[in-house]
């Protein structure tokens, strides 16, 4: 399963970013193999619509879930419409993804 994670860096040891819409990168992790790809977030420098741009990137990557420290209402609405579950996470990307796989993260309501 593909999980998208907001971050500033480009590796699995990077920290989960506190902001989805304004994070520099979104790392898309395949949980079966822990292989990943890094995608630049087009919303990082946008004047408006950052959350929706990040949500579109997550959807285009084929992710079924996303992890970030915080979400705006527009990105949460976009995820709900697309059937993508949003989770609050912290720490390193690898740890946050494993916590989600292990059922230790609760989806944002």
Image: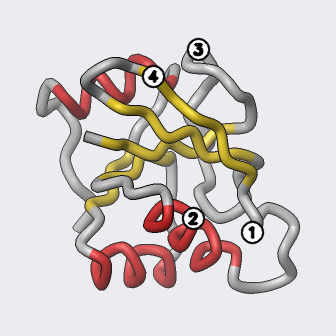
Q: Secondary structure at mark 4?
A: strand
Q: Which badge, 1 or 2, comes first in the chain's sequence?
A: 1
Work out how far the residue at label 2 is from the one at label 4, CA to CA, in angstroms.
Answer: 18 Å
Crowd rating for badge 2 (residues with CA inside 10 Å; few <14, some 14–19, many 20+): some
Q: Quadrant of the N terminus?
A: top left
- Residue at 32% over, 50% down: 87
- Residue at 47% over, 80% down: 73
Contact (Cβ within 8 Å) of mark 4 with mark 1: no
Rendered position, 61 above or below 97? below
Crowd rating for badge 4 (residues with CA inside 10 Å; few <14, some 14–19, many 20+): few
Q: Which badge, 4 or 1, comes first in the chain's sequence?
A: 4
Q: Give the image location of residue 2, x and y in percent.
A: 34, 43
Q: Which badge, 2 or 4, comes first in the chain's sequence?
A: 4
Q: Specify the quadrant of the image occupied by residue 32.
A: top left
Q: Quadrant of the C terminus?
A: bottom left
How many marks the image carries: the answer is 4
Rendered position, 3 above or below 95? below
Work out how far the residue at label 1 is from the one at label 2, CA to CA, in angstroms.
Answer: 9 Å
Mark 4 highlights which residue?
Answer: 35
Rendered position, 64 above or below 89? below
Mark 2 highlights which residue?
Answer: 57
Q: Nearer the viewer, mark 1 or mark 2?
A: 2
Contact (Cβ within 8 Å) of mark 1 with mark 2: yes
Q: Secondary structure at mark 1?
A: loop
Mark 1 highlights which residue?
Answer: 43
Mark 3 highlights which residue?
Answer: 13
With 59 as the anchor, is 50 left or right in this view?
A: right
Contact (Cβ within 8 Å) of mark 3 with mark 2: no
Q: Give the image location of residue 39, x and y in percent.
A: 67, 47
């Amino acid at each position: 399963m593909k999980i998208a994670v907001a971050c500033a860096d480009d590796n699995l040891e990077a920290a989960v970013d506190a902001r989805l819409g304004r994070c520099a990168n979104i790392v898309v992790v395949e949980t079966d193999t822990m292989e990943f790809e890094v995608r630049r977030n087009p919303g990082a420098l946008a004047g408006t619509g950052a959350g929706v741009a990040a949500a579109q990137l997550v959807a285009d990557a084929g992710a079924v879930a996303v992890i970030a420290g915080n979400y705006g209402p527009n990105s949460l609405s976009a995820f709900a419409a697309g059937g993508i579950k949003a989770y609050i996470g912290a720490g390193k990307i690898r740890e946050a993804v494993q916590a989600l796989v292990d059922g230790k993260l609760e989806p944002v309501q």
